[in-house]
Amino acid sequence: MGEKSDFCLLIIMASLRDIKRRIKSVKNTQQITRAMKLVSAAKMKRAQEAILAARPYAMKMMDVMSSLACRVDTTAHPLLSRREEKNIMLVVITSDKGLCGGFNGNIIRRTLRFMEDKGRNNISLVVVGKKGRDYFRAKKYGISKEYVDFFRVFSYQRASLIVKDIIDGYTSEQVDSVYVVYNEFKSVIQQRVVAESLLSIPPLVCKVGEEPPDYLYEPSAEVILDDLLKKYVEIEVYRALLESISSEHGARMTAMDSATRNASEMISGLTLTYNRARQAAITKELIEIVSGADALK
């Protein structure tokens, strides 16, 4: 009887050690998720300030380009030409790292839906981010260009690398239109997946009896048109990348906050289980001691 009791006690003690190890493991994980949340919060603040500063400039540039496209001959520059959509370039902006909730999954699902709507056979993918690259490569989709570890050291000059491929593909008529899919930053807990046209430049829709604002060009519209159009595309791509960066950090911050809370709940549950098992072991030992004392009487 005594050997059986000792064996049961050893099992209980082993179970207690296992629970303690699990509690320690979850606490370590909680420290990591809490640290990742704080890091994402700091990075998101800087990214949010950058996007808020870039949005007004991008919107004004869009107004200027729309007015210009509305007034000039569409044959004046290759970027203003509008062709039938036989071949499409789709720029998909994902993240290089995971642990950011449904950030990348939402982008991928929106991309697949876009490809189904347009017909996937005439779409060339330009993928920004390791997560998107890995998914489309695993699914055997053709990727014409990929940019991985792109956000490690992000800058306006880095964004211009993507723009060069976009402009070269459009002006050489390898593609007839360019779209970009990305997460637009709304708030820390809200991001909106956007699939918008980048090229050709949409003309400004003028109301009846209302003329759009005109501009004076020095030295001439023809001279500055090339640089101005390229700058417009650069700004739009740069803005989309900034929106994606802010959305990624917001999504990761939310995901890590949820993971930290879940870890706290798990630690509380494991601690309760540990205390109950420990109390059961103590009670069992007391019962054995009392039973042994009674047997000696």
Image: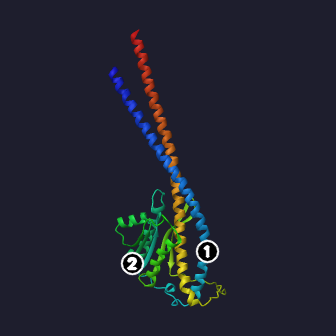
User: Can you say whether 86 is above or below 42 in the image?
Assistant: below
Could you say which disc has been placed on residue 206 in the image? none
| Residue at the disc numbered 1 | 57
Which quadrant of the figure has residue 63? bottom right
Which quadrant of the figure has residue 111? bottom left
Question: How far across and how far down the image is residue 12, in percent?
Answer: 39, 30
**Mark 2 crowdedness (10 Å alpha carbons): few <14, some 14-19, many ≥20:** some
| Residue at the disc numbered 2 | 122
User: Can you say whether 272 is above or below 213 in the image?
Assistant: above
Residue 204 in view in this figure:
no
Which quadrant of the figure has residue 98? bottom left
Amino acid marked by disc 2: Asn
Q: Residue at x 50, y 84 (%)?
A: 79
Of the pair 120 and 51, the residue shown nearer to us: 51
Amino acid marked by disc 1: Tyr
Give the distance between the C-alpha atoms of the residues marked 1 and 2, in whole angstroms: 33 Å
Question: How far across and how far down the image is residue 110, in percent?
Answer: 46, 67
- Identify the coloring: rainbow
Question: How far across and how far down the image is residue 168, in percent?
Answer: 44, 81
- Report the mark closest to the observer, 1 or 2: 1
Question: How far across and how far down the image is residue 51, in percent?
Answer: 58, 67
Asked if residue 19 lies left or right of residue 1, the reply is: right
N-terminal of the two: label 1 or label 2?
A: 1
The local secondary structure at tag 1 comes to helix
